[in-house]
Image: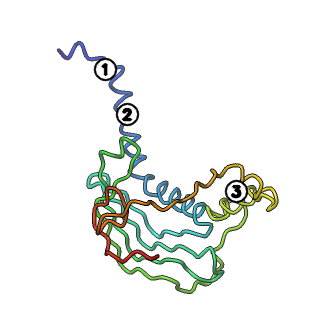
Amino acid sequence: MSVANVRWKAVRPLAICGALGLGAWILFADRVAKGAVESVGTTLIGATVEIRRLHLDVSHARVELRGLTVASPFEALQNLLEADELVADVDPLPLLEKKVVIDRLAAKGLRFGRPRTTDGRVSGQGDGVRGQVERWFAQLQVPASSTRASSARLLPRRRSLRRSTRPARPGTAGCKGSMSPLPSTPPST
């Protein structure tokens, strides 16, 4: 392939777009990831999730969180978790399959149940998975009278349990194909 065959009209815009994308990644990736983690964490837990600094190190496949604070969804002025530093080494190949595999997770300065100055609970639509489960469970409330009638139809009939007239082998207590012998006890009459 010679220099004359290269389409410079296509290479230049492609190189410019690639450089702009790389510059945007360098400038904004950490901020966007920090906002996404705080937003999703707050929605899942139903309480405020705060991160002082998040750094994505793509060359070493590492995520660093500094100053993580997770408020308690149950107590108004209490933190569920505080961490000075969390470092996760991520395996990059499963990310192509939309899977996250963390090879190593190191934590420094973990504290639980510490007091906080403001209420960290979140109410409304983002009240966490617990609120969603409670709303879903409230839809499944069935009156007690209809439960007995419907469950009686769903359960199979009980078979009578007759005692075998054949004596059991010693050590198996009548279990066919038992892997380990049970302690032998004299049969009750």
Query: Which residue bears the numbered disc 3?
Result: 136
Quadrant of residue 77 in the image?
A: bottom right
Give me the residue at 42% from left, 53% from top.
27
Relative to the observer, which residue lies in front, 73 or 16?
Answer: 73
> Does label 1 or label 3 sit earlier along the sequence?
1
Query: Which residue bears the numbered disc 2?
Result: 16
The image shows residue 26 at horizontal and vertical percentages of: 38, 51
Give me the residue at 30% from left, 48% from top.
92
Does residue 97 lie above or below 141 as drawn?
above
Give me the residue at 36% from left, 46% from top.
95
> Does label 2 or label 1 sit earlier along the sequence?
1
Residue 147 relative to residue 70: left or right: right
The image shows residue 11 at horizontal and vertical percentages of: 32, 24
Does residue 89 lie above or below 93 as drawn?
below
| Callout 1 crowding tier (Cα within 10 Å): few <14, some 14–19, many ≥20 | few
Residue 161 relative to residue 137: left or right: left
Quadrant of residue 175 in the image?
A: bottom left
Q: Three-letter amino acid code at disc 1?
A: Trp
| Callout 3 crowding tier (Cα within 10 Å): few <14, some 14–19, many ≥20 | few
Query: Which residue bears the numbered disc 1?
Result: 8
